[in-house]
Amino acid sequence: MRFNYGDKTLLRVLDEAEFWKRQEAEHTVVIRVIVPNLEPVFVEQLKAWEQVFTQTDATIGKYIETIVRSGYCINPELYREILDLIRLTICQSQNFIALLNAISAESEAVRSNPTAPVVINHIRRESAYFIGVAQTVLYC
């Protein structure tokens, strides 16, 4: 993501967050599909994360609508709420990566599937990419 959006940078990072939360929700499904014999504990955790990501995606959408309808006028309270939401999305992605690490390390079903580790590593890198983008906005 480029950071030359001026007063719309916050909106742009929300767009990124919305996209990546949707991606992460889809990634939970991808893993369950490519590893049909995944251990039940991991299946349940992935299903729970799918719901979390879907709910966060919806929340982000509401904030985007609020900003657009306000004519990009972001008061200090809304600004703080959005930064808190971005921090939450980062935390979610960090925890999702931890789950992916656990699945990779502990799942016999993943180890016995030559495609699964490649896909899980790709998913891990995508979540890490989002973390980097979101952190840049927080620390600029």
Image: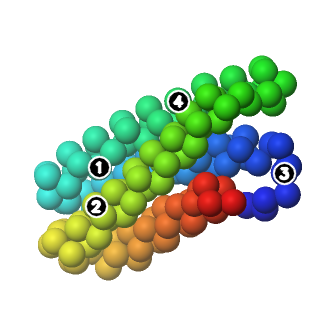
Quadrant position of residue 117:
bottom left
Inter-mark Cα distance, 3 to 1: 35 Å
Q: Nearer the viewer, mark 1 or mark 4?
A: 4
- Name the spot of residue 6 as percent of width and height, x first: 85, 49
The first of marks 2 and 1 along the sequence is 1
Q: Residues within 10 Å of mark 4 (few under 14, many from 20)?
A: few
- Name the spot of residue 49 as percent of width and height, x first: 33, 45
Inter-mark Cα distance, 2 to 1: 8 Å
Q: Give 98 or 30, whichever is nearer the viewer.
A: 98
Q: Looking at the image, do the residues carrying marks 2 and 4 touch, with CB atoms under 8 Å apart?
A: no
Residue at the spot of label 3: 5
Q: Nearer the viewer, mark 2 or mark 3?
A: 3
- Name the spot of residue 107 as percent of width and height, x first: 17, 69
The first of marks 3 and 1 along the sequence is 3
Q: Looking at the image, do the residues carrying marks 2 and 1 touch, with CB atoms under 8 Å apart?
A: yes
Q: Give 93 or 81, whichever is nearer the viewer.
A: 81
Q: Residue at x 40, y 50 (%)?
A: 92
Inter-mark Cα distance, 1 to 4: 20 Å
Q: Secondary structure at mark 4?
A: helix
Residue at the spot of label 2: 99
Tell me the number on the disc at residue 46. 1
